[in-house]
Amino acid sequence: MTHRNRPTITLLACLTTTALLTSCAQKSPEAGRPNTAPPPATSASSATPTESTSSPSTASGPPERPANAKGLTLAAGEQFVRYYSELLNYASETGNTAPMLDNSEAGCESCKSYAGFVAKANAANGLLKGDYRERVTDVPDLFRGEGGHLGGSANVSVGAYVSQETKTSAPIRVKAAKYKREFGLSVSHGNWVMYEMELVKQ
């Protein structure tokens, strides 16, 4: 994959006109317009999801950051984005959000929103069913911003799934779809962490 290292565009410019981050220097509660459902929140449909057969076992615990996702290179940034997607999937499967939050900046509002939802509704407690795991198919855009941040986007696909906020709430049926995740990364202890993110349906 070829990474385009754009000369310091003001951090994430704040990422383009569909700005993921509304403030480059400050963490805004409005930044990222956090998702309200695991993977993406979309309108209900009549699709009937099938159980995913590709979900790895979570018995061995959360995925560990791979060696190629360590450090502060562009290549490490790309691999971190793929790794973070695995952490999101793990949280959705188990309700254990600690690993993803440990790899998120404390001010990442969309990260906290995602964690809050899947802590209540996840596959382990039966409130999330189907092919809900997201898959990063490409990270075509990656660039350095000011203040040591990294910005870009990733192409993500998610299968059909059903989620419920509680056991008595009406199920929300979501069709399989493709998305773009716009993201900003910041630095913590010599590695990239998620600074902010937004998932946009394509």
Image (tube, rainbow, N blue to C red):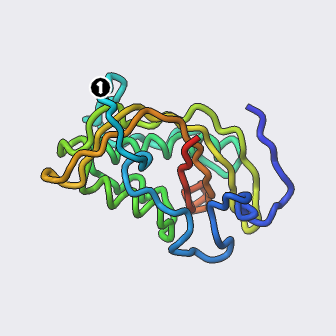
Q: Residue furthest top?
A: 53
Q: Residue furthest left?
A: 168
Residue at (36, 37) in percent of width and height: 132
User: Within 10 Å of the Cα at label 1, are there few (<14), some (14-19), or many (20+) other Cα atoms?
Assistant: some
Occupied quadrant, residue 196: bottom right
Q: For this rendering, which residue is in front, 21 or 195?
A: 21
Q: How many marks?
A: 1
Occupied quadrant, residue 172: top left
Q: Quadrant of the C terminus?
A: top right
Q: Position of residue 103 (x, y in %)?
A: 48, 56
Q: Quadrant of the N terminus?
A: top right
Residue at (76, 61) in percent of width and height: 145
Residue at (53, 72) in percent of width and height: 30
Report the side of 65 relative to 44 (left or right): right
Q: Position of residue 15 (x, y in %)?
A: 71, 58
Report the side of 146 relative to 56 (left or right): right
Can you identify the residue that label 1 sits on? Answer: 50
Q: For this rendering, which residue is in front, 80 or 32?
A: 32
Q: For this rendering, which residue is in front, 32 or 75?
A: 32
Mark 1 lies on a secondary structure that is: loop
Residue at (24, 45) in percent of width and height: 171
Q: Position of residue 177 (x, y in %)?
A: 49, 35
Q: Amino acid at mark 1?
A: Thr
